[in-house]
Amino acid sequence: MEILTIATQAFSDQRPGTSGLRKKVSVFQAPHYLENFVQSIYDTRTDLAGGTLVLGGDGRYYNRQAVQIIIRMAAANGVARIIVGQGGLLSTPAASGIIRKHGTNGGIILSASHNPGGPDGDFGIKFNTPNGGPAPEGVTEAIFARTREITEYRTLASKDIDLDTIATLSLGNTRVEVIDPVADYAALMEQLFDFKRIHRLFDSGLFRMHFDAMHAITGPYARRILEEMLGAEPGTVINGIPSEDFGGGHPDPNLVHAHEVVALTSGRNAVDFAAASDGDGDRNMILGRDFFVTPSDSLAVMAANAHHIKGYSGGINGVARSMPTSQAVDRVAEALGIDCFETPTGWKFFGNLLDAKRITLCGEESFGTGSDHVREKDGLWAVLFWLNLLAVRKQSVKEIVQEHWRRFGRNFYTRYDYEGIDTEAANGLMAHLQARLPDLPEATLDGYTVDYADNFAYTDPVDGSVSKNQGIRIGFTDGSRIVYRLSGTGTAGATLRVYLEAFEPDREKQDQETAAVMQPLVEIATDMAEIETRTGRKQPTVIT
Ligand code: G1P
Ligand code: ZN
């Protein structure tokens, strides 16, 4: 088959962010834009020539076309074998698992995660290394450097291949295996969790749940695993058919965007358990009857209960959380006598710790939890972990979490997001905070005494690499914290995130409303950063 070499010009804006390269669909559709980035991956990851590539995406608009482009270019660049999910689909955690299981040279995942889809929405692409994890900064920077100097790319003069039938095809000298996107993942889940026990929980007729796939990738995964393998009632999975624009919604599993499933957890017919996942299946939200589990608490509860779960019954090596995630898991680690690492935001920072077996569980406040079974966060995994725990402990979600607070103390938590603000204003605000840092330690703000104030930097304990400028942290002597950082995943303007945490050891005070508890810290945080005057925003766009 004829290999075409196409002349191109470099784009200057192809530096991957927190999680790959994300842009508006229209940007990716511009001539050569996707191709340049993909060729830069093939040029940098030279072992892909003659090697195996995993490929799939979350099914959003442009997924199909992009998969065909990437396959043709893979063949023209000498990739020997491509493993692609049927329909061009793979959830992010499933892709990570497949990259690992089949001993491949890495994978390309097409997703903009929880960002809206459709022709006017977002698209994204990222490269995951052979350990199954998002490429570390050294790799993304090398790909970015290549995008700056690229002058041509290679592709094949060939028609689209049939992505919809499970089969092995050949394209030039390349073998293309179109696989069932769910099978390997479901098998992995069956190794980790006690499926029989969960099945009995559903069979008892005393337990009902809903899972909201938000019209995104986890629909087929959740239906197969929850309804077909575990015996949950048909209809347990809602919004289970993936659509290119996620039904016009915003596939982010939080109290705002997943309100449909939240509503099913209250009222007379409320279910006992509910959950949701995001566009590409790596995030999760956990709910009980009339009860929301913060992601930070979810991680802490998992760590404290891991011994109840088959795949973790031998004990956990250690835990890690991203810096803005609440310190709830730190207390569990202390009680268990295991290490707890604080890493910058973004899953890629967990990879080395997992590979080196320094940690087993990790998570982020942004609705991400996961373990060493793959190298991405994993939404459905978290749901199965909770289901398994509910089946073992025979208590409600609320009882389990409240008992946890009584034992370890409660870390109240909230996050304020100011989306789409002016980039210069956002940078100015961060510079203003940075300038205030030296004066803050020991200062008293509305009765809170500052313990430390810094711009978070992280030294990876495994490879010694240093990541600076990862967010402003202000810690108070009573364990409360305020954290500020700018998002690295947005595609328009800047997003300021303000993370707030308050620690409450007193059992009598642990059942208060979060909003009331956090109010004083919210005021300190908004005043200190001069949010209203600098951004013109009186209120955040989203509170989670
Ligand atoms: C956000 C989350 C972060 C997560 C990332 C990818 O990044 O805050 O925890 O790892 O999405 O899902 P941000 O936009 O804050 O850079
Ligand atoms: Zn995601």
Image: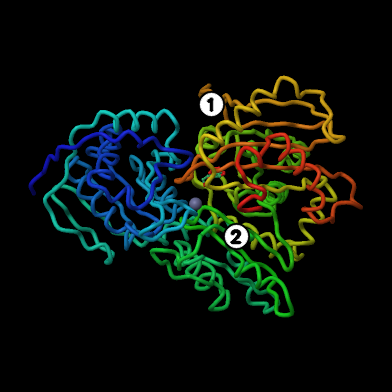
> What type is the residue that disc 2 sits on?
Val
Residue 295 pos. (x, y %): 66, 51
User: Residue at label 1?
Assistant: 467
Please say if the residues under marks 2 and 1 sit with CB atoms less than 8 Å apart. Answer: no
**Residue lying at 41% horizontally and 28% vertically, measured from the top left:** 138
**Residue lying at 62% horizontally and 57% vertically, measured from the top left:** 385
- Near-viewer residue (139 or 381): 139
Residue 473 pos. (x, y %): 68, 31
**Residue lying at 71% horizontally and 65% vertically, measured from the top left:** 288
Q: Is residue 212 left or right of residue 326?
A: left
> What type is the residue that disc 1 sits on?
Ser
Name which of mark 2 and mark 1 comes first in the sequence.
2
- Near-viewer residue (293 or 187): 293
Q: Is residue 89 left or right of residue 486?
A: left
User: From the Cβ of disc 1, is ligand 1 less than 8 Å away?
Assistant: no
Per the rendering, the mark at residue 38 is none
Residue 310 in which image quadrant: bottom right
Circle 1 SS class: strand
User: Residue at label 2?
Assistant: 383
Q: Considering only vertical position in the picture, is 351 above or below 84?
A: above
- Near-viewer residue (174 or 156): 156
Residue 163 in which image quadrant: bottom left
Q: Outermost residue, left direction?
A: 2
- Near-viewer residue (275 or 310): 275
Can residue 162 be seen here? The reply is yes
Can residue 361 be seen here? The reply is no
Residue 109 pos. (x, y %): 38, 48
Residue 268 in which image quadrant: bottom right
